[in-house]
Amino acid sequence: MREEYNNKHRRWYDKDPILSRSMKTLEASDDETQIKVALNLIKIIAEHNIAFSEYTDVDEIIEAVEEGMDTRANSRWYDIDRTVRAAISMLQTSPPETQKLLAKEMAKIVIDKIKEDKDIEELKRELEQQELLEDKKDEFFNEDN
């Protein structure tokens, strides 16, 4: 059942503001974050969807989802990676209540990933500063000899 989209809701996920924002944030994220979010989405959707309970791993779910997809749809940002494409397809066909739940989960995962990346960058800067200080200290003590 395909829904009609009006000018206000250009894409299927624009009907829900949280889902729309989560999708925009996900689209702007790096590939690694997109795949991480996609894998989490697939797992969460599979846990809540009896139809996917027969599969033993994520690859089987992705293959099953791909079999039912239109192979001509390759122009969207999430069509580049098969994991992301499968996760978004599963999200699109989920009930609206599940979409709302998953939108919040997506936002949380992306925010956590961004925080993790910032923490790593800060740690790298601290280590670089520490190394510079050690180098300066070594230079100072070697000059005295």
Image: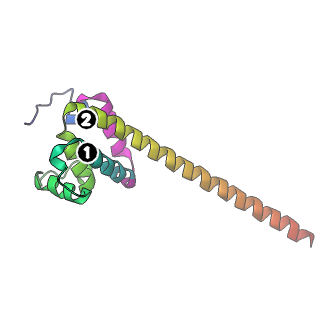
User: The N terminus is located in which quarter?
Assistant: top left
Does the segment drawn in magenta span residue 104? no
User: The C terminus is located in which quarter?
Assistant: bottom right
Pointer 2 residue: 99
Pointer 1 residue: 47
Question: Residue at left 76%, top 62%?
Answer: 134
Which numbered disc, 1 or 2, marks the residue that appears first in the sequence?
1
User: Relative to residue 102, is residue 115 drawn left or right?
Assistant: right
Q: Can you name the residue that lies furthest to the right here?
A: 144
Q: Can you name the residue that lies furthest to the left here?
A: 1
Does the segment drawn in magenta span residue 18? yes
Question: Residue at left 36%, top 54%?
Answer: 31
Q: How many labels does the image show?
A: 2
Residue 52 vs residue 71, the one in the foreground: 52
Residue 89 vs residue 135, the one in the foreground: 89
Question: Residue at left 22%, top 58%?
Answer: 56
Q: What residue type is labelled 1?
A: Glu
Question: Badge 2: how crowded within 10 Å, few (<14), some, or many (20+)?
Answer: many
Which percent across, then down, holds residue 2? 9, 36
Please state the extent of the stretch shown in magenta in the rendering: 15-32
Mark 2: which secondary structure?
helix
